Amino acid sequence: MNPSTLGWVEKFLRELDDTINLSQWSLDELYSDLRKAGFIYGTSVDTIISNTTDIVYSEEEKTKINLFTALVITYYDTIENPDKEDCINALIQFYDFLDTKKSFFSFTNVLPSNKNEKLEKIIHARIQTNESIFKKNFSHLLTNALLFIDILAFEYFLIHDKNPFDYAAKLEETLTNTVFLALNSKQEQDDYDKLLVKLFSSSVRYTDISTEEASFDYIALDPYTDEIEKRYIIDLTSLAVWNDKELDKGEQSFMSALGAELELPNVVVKESIDLVKAFINEHKKDISFFNYSHPALHFYQQTSRTVSVLILRNKKRLIKEITESKDLMILLGQSAVRDLSKEEKKQVKKQLLDICKTVPSLAIFILPGGSLLMPLLVKFIPQLLPSAFNENKQ
């Protein structure tokens, strides 16, 4: 199942039927799994269901899978007599309610041949931003951290059978205002904090958020009585106040006060902060926001990850094409024991580009400027070739 090609929703639902009993998966378990996978924090480092294929998923594909899986589980957990076709209809109707003038997708541009494909396009558009390529890595963290609003709003829609827009807008407003208040509680704000404020402001879907200083008096937390709603608010706020060191006194006081406002015990607040720190410390290198430096570096890093996925996904095809190119095989073998001449390097580059033309998904290499990515392809060649080539290199 490839989430980047048409038909993945239908195939995914078939595979779910074979591997998972959706009706036995509770929303509490779902939330914990989504948090562990990074979905709650805006960076999906894994999927909440096992990947039974040899496909290496990109972060965007993992986010798609996690969002759709969570929506389907929410449906099966809420509806008494669940049905796959009814689930698809309910999801399309749900997102139709959320399609406003400040929309994150436009149905006028969605012209699929069936409902499954329509939902695929909606989900794809849902995790996108309107930012430039350089800002996209940053804004994805915040935009996708707000994706769990969809899950809660969908549950609200199924239970109350009414337009979920007001609920989603209010929850988003509460989350962002709480984050702004948390950031203002810091004794000293650094570049990350300032960037975070800007990103939250640009990531909201439904409301216009004020970044002016506020207090708990202006944030309505009383309506949120569900345990998962409270945990989501506290987890997203913990993400906002995270830093490499211990929380300062202002942050500690704020988190304790927020926990009290939400009627959560201190142990839950501490667990939230500890889980955020553990997750970021383990996956920090994969989260663009926490590697904030030069936009060109982020562009290269993102492109590098994309190329890595493409190469690994097309490993078998690449091996076949390389082994069929005798001159290239000879030159690659010689490169393991000596430096190639300028002419030989040109020949290697030319033949690698020819190979890329035969593997459609590697078309990125033959676009203008694509040759700059060639070192990334060459970097993976030793991993693809037989061990005889690597032994000489070692």
Image: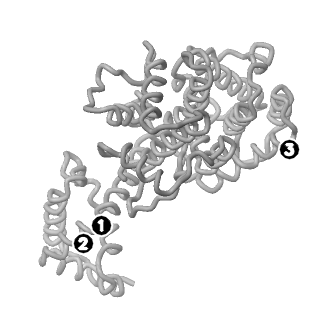
Q: Position of residue 332 (x, y in %)?
A: 23, 77
Question: Residue 319: which disc?
Answer: 2
In this view, the residue in front, 94 or 348, is 94
Tell me which label, 2 or 3, sits earlier in the chain. Answer: 3
Q: Is residue 122 above or below residue 76?
A: above
- SS for callout 2: helix
Q: Quadrant of residue 81?
A: top right
Pointers 2 and 1 in contact (CB under 8 A)? Answer: yes
- SS for callout 3: helix
> Is residue 92 rendered to the left or right of residue 237?
left
Pointers 1 and 3 in contact (CB under 8 A)? Answer: no
CA neighbours of label 3 inside 10 A, class few (<14), some (14 to 19), many (20+): few
CA neighbours of label 1 inside 10 A, class few (<14), some (14 to 19), many (20+): some
> Is residue 253 rendered to the left or right of residue 220?
right
Question: Can residue 241 be seen at all in this image of the molecule?
Answer: no
- The residue carrying mark 1 is 315
Separation of residues labelled 1 and 3 (CA atoms):
47 Å
Say which residue appears at 56% left-offset and 14% top-offset: 208
